[in-house]
Every structure is written in C-alpha cells, then in structure tokens.
Image (spheres, helix red, strand yellow):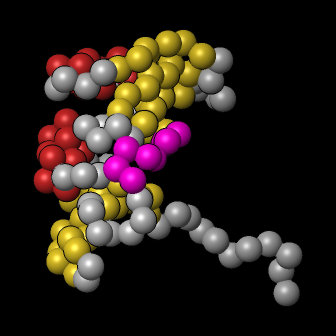
Amino acid sequence: MSSHANITHASFITLPVADQDRALRFYVDVLGFDVTADREMPPGRWLQVAPAGAQTVFTLAGPGMGDFAPGSARGIMLVTTDVDADCARLTAAGAEVTGPDDVPWGRMASFSDPDGNALMLITEKEGF
C-alpha cells in the first residue's frame, strides 16, 4: 500500500451566490468562463463554470444548495496571461479591483464577484 493519497485534482470549488443568473453573467460575460453544467436537480439548480480547458470548475451555489453564505469564499487564485488587461476588463464591468501590483512571484490583483466572493488574479513570474 502506498503511503501517499491517490488524489489527482480538485473537481470543483463552491462559490456561494445569492443570484445564480447574476453570477453566471459575471463569470461568463466578464471573466470569459464557459458553462460546464446547468441543470435542475434536487435541491436546486446545479450551475458550474470554468475557464476553457480547466480541470477544476466553479459551482455557483445558490440558495438552498448547502449551508453556504453568499460571498463567503476567499483566497481563490486565478492565473492569467495578462493581469493588467483583465483588471481593466473587470473595472469597466464595475468591479472594484485592488492592484495590480508587482510581487516577488509575479503581478497580482484582487477583486470580488457581485456577491463578495474574494478572488485574485496573477500573472506568474517566469521560473517562479
């Protein structure tokens, strides 16, 4: 028996939202994510989005989809090839963006989705 777990990746990250349609518009129209699942199932709508080609998706969990408080997700880092362009897009869409700032590991910014879930963007420094 191996002394290591056999985990290969995270399947999904839950983003608690108050309004799934509003969240969907933000993640698709502003961030450019794809819809990977959108179906009704007990106890409610199962709605998932992800950047193109990503292994891990984001579940936009609306009311009744668990014991989650909208806006309670923190510390989610999204890697981008151009943090400055993405910050400009977010600002134009009305999001409050902090940064971007140079850090030892790249260039970073932070923002929140319409529900207050805190996310970060980073363009990673080559070789870090």
Q: Residue at x 50, y 19 (%)?
A: 107
Depth check: 68 or 106 in front? Answer: 68
Instruction: Name the image quarter holding the N terminus.
Output: bottom right
Position of residue 111 relative to residue 7, above or below, is above
Point out residue 73 in the picture as x, y percentages from the top left corner: 45, 47
Q: Is residue 37 magenta?
A: no
Q: Residue at x 49, y 42 (%)?
A: 74
Position of residue 128 relative to residue 50, above or below, is above
The answer to whether 16 appears left or right of 103 in the picture is left
Depth check: 126 or 123 in front? Answer: 123
Q: Which residue is drawn at 54% across and 12% down?
A: 102
Q: Is residue 74 magenta?
A: yes
Query: From where the camera sits, is residue 76 visible?
Result: yes
The answer to whether 123 appears left or right of 20 in the picture is right
Instruction: Name the image quarter holding the C terminus.
Output: top right
Give the magenta-colored segment's residue range: 69-76
Q: Using the rendered view, name the quadrant where residue 104 is placed.
A: top right
Q: Residue at x 35, y 20 (%)?
A: 97
Position of residue 43 relative to residue 93, above or below, is below
Magenta highlight: main SS? loop
Point out residue 120 in the picture as x, y percentages from the top left corner: 45, 32
Position of residue 68 relative to residue 88, above or below, is below
Point out residue 105 in the picture as x, y percentages from the top left corner: 62, 24
Query: From where the camera sits, is residue 31 visible?
Result: no
